[in-house]
């Protein structure tokens, strides 16, 4: 019998978001070995991970930077996906900026991919519906990042860095109303697999 492929280890950092368990569940559906961890988990207590998700969070934490150890997690040499507050925090950490949104979004929204959308949006349509729940948004993209999706009300719906190991999504791909959310998680898992094998 041939060897089975080892399971991927991708944990979810809980920043107090209402749908963190859905992110964990989506990874489980994809056969990933995953745990939800509080965001004050010390760096030295993490498993030897293949990837990490920084979840959404309670109101304003992406702007204020009150995400406990998330700055330490971003020093890890593994692919990391930031969702909503995690996305905003990531932008600030790398020298960009998040601020109150002129048009806070709650509910379904339509986004458009920018220049193909990068790795997270691979094999998804150029225009698609997603689910929003935010008062704040990324207003300045960090150096060495590019915008990968946008909407009429939010310019930075998604971003990706040049080395293709840091990704941010303003919306919630883990919610059913995000039409291609599962595919985005599959794409992130694929990124982690490739990084592990390189």
Image (spheres, rainbow, N blue to C red):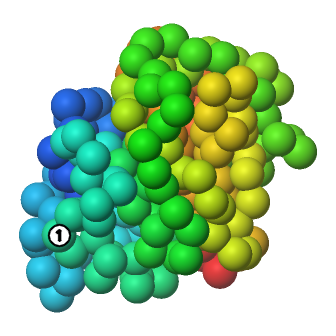
The correct choice, above or below, for 31 with respect to 49 in the image is: above
Residue 62 falls in image quadrant: bottom left
Residue in view at x 74 percent, y 47 percent: 148
Measured along the vertical axis of the image, is residue 85 above or below residue 30?
below
Camera-side residue of 24 and 86: 86
Residue 2: image location, x then y, percent: 52, 59
Coordinates of residue 49 in the picture (x, y in percent)? 34, 72
Residue 123, horizontal then vertical, whole percent: 77, 33
Furthest residue in direction front, as rendered: 102
Give coordinates of residue 78: x percent, y percent: 48, 75
* Residue where numbered disc 1 is placed: 68
Dividing the image into 4 quarters, which one contains the C terminus? bottom right
- In the rendered image, the residue lying farthest to the right is 115
Disc 1 residue crowd, few under 14, some 14–19, many 20+, Cα 10 Å: some
**How many numbered markers are drawn?**
1
Please say whether residue 34 is visible from this viewpoint: no
Q: Nearer the viewer, residue 16 or 28?
A: 16
Residue at 52% in and 32% down: 102
- Given residues 45 and 105, the one toward you in this image is 105
Left or right position of 113 against 188: right
Which picture quadrant has residue 27? top left
Q: What residue lies at 14% left-to-right and 58% top-to-bottom?
A: 37
119 is higher (above) or lower (below) than 114: below
Q: Quadrant of residue 163?
A: bottom right
Q: Is residue 177 left or right of residue 162?
A: left
> Residue drawn 59% across and 52% down?
139
Q: Nearer the viewer, residue 8 or 113?
A: 113
Horizontal side, residue 144 vs residue 75: left or right: right
Say if residue 39 shows up in the picture: yes
Question: Tag 1's secondary structure?
Answer: loop
Please state if 102 lies on the left or on the right of 148 as rendered: left
């Amino acid at each position: 019998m041939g060897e089975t492929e080892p399971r991927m280890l991708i944990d979810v950092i809980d920043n107090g978001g209402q749908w963190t368990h859905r992110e964990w569940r989506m990874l489980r559906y994809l056969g990933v070995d995953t745990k939800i961890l509080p965001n004050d988990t010390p760096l030295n207590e993490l498993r030897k991970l293949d990837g990490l998700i920084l979840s959404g969070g309670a109101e304003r934490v992406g702007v204020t930077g009150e995400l406990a150890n998330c700055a330490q997690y971003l020093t890890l040499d593994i692919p990391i996906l930031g969702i909503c507050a995690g996305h905003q925090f990531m932008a600030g950490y790398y020298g960009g900026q998040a601020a109150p949104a002129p048009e806070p979004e709650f509910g379904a929204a339509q986004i458009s991919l920018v220049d193909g959308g990068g790795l997270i949006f691979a094999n998804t349509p150029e225009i698609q519906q997603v689910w929003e729940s935010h008062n704040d948004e990324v207003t300045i993209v960090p150096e060495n990042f590019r915008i990968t999706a946008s909407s009429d009300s939010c310019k930075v719906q998604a971003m990706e860095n040049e080395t293709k190991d840091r990704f941010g999504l303003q919306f919630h791909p883990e919610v059913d109303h995000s039409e291609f959310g599962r595919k985005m998680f599959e794409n992130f898992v694929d990124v982690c697999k490739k990084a592990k094998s390189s």
